[in-house]
Amino acid sequence: MSGVSSAAYFARRAAQKEKVRILYRRALKDTLNWAVHRHIFYRDASDLREKFNANQDVEDVDRIDKLIAHGEAEYDKWRHPDPYIVPWAPGGSKFCRNPTPPAGIEIVYNYGQEDNP
Amino acid sequence: MALRTAVLRHLRVPVTGSNQSQIGFLGSIRAFSSHDDHLSKQEVVDRVLDVVKCFPKVDPAKVTPDVHFQKDLGLDSLDTVEIVMAIEEEFKLEIPDKEAEKVDSCPLAIEYVFNHPMSS
């Protein structure tokens, strides 16, 4: 009984840790979108890190859930309307621009003029 | 007209398929493409190690190509996220969130960057 609940507890904590990491990653990328100049970005990034570190030692699972929900709401509020996406990634400008042609396709260089090669 | 083409067909030597096998091989290389800068493994290793060494919370003397960020270098999980983001910026990659979770150590990072087709 307690074994099952502790396994569930650890699974929940692991899921929360993963959510926190993903949230931190997205928030950091968002900070970079808003603060393009690096000196401003470093200041904002350390502020963000302080916010995350302040709640580092919370052990109560429900409180952690509420903090994560609060963090995700903040992230949604601050999302940049025009984020920088690497060009070849989905959402970037070069995505699907020049797909590799399917194999076996050749170019016929003298189409219509096979009679005079 | 038909006589002329028949005579020409005899006179002119047709191009045989010996070139086509070459073109079949060269067809994989596109001219004016920007996808041709594939990095060498040593270069990837050097650049990744530089990125890790420049991280302020890391002791540069301890960084080798097979350190684990959390176990060997004593970093936090949030620090790992920061290092992965720095590697993304260095190699102009976009690592999806699920993959970025798994990159936990130097050898994994090097392998990921090396095997990624768009790293530059």
Image: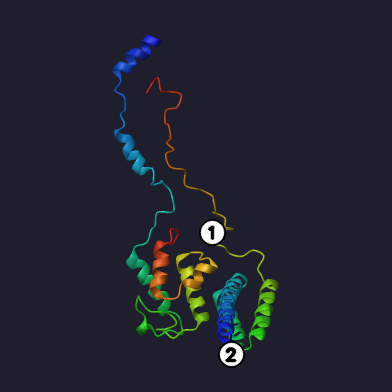
Measured from the top left, where is residue A1 in percent x and y? 59, 85
Q: Are marks 1 and 2 on the same chain?
A: yes
* Residue type marked 2: Asp
* Residue type marked 1: Ala
For the C terminus of chain A, give its image quadrant: top left
Q: Nearer the viewer, mark 1 or mark 2?
A: 2
Colour scheme in use: rainbow
Q: Residues within 10 Å of mark 1 (few under 14, many from 20)?
A: some
Q: Is residue A77 above or below residue A93?
A: below
Residue A28 in which image quadrant: bottom right
Question: Which residue is located at x 34 percent, y 78 percent?
Answer: B64
Q: Return the residue at label 2.
A: A57
Question: Which residue is located at x 69 percent, y 79 percent?
Answer: A70
- On screen, residue A15 versus residue A107, left or right, reads right
Residue B62 in which image quadrant: bottom left
Q: Return the residue at label 1.
A: A89
Chain label for disc 2: A
Q: Residue furthest front?
A: A1
Q: Is residue B13 above or below residue A79?
A: above
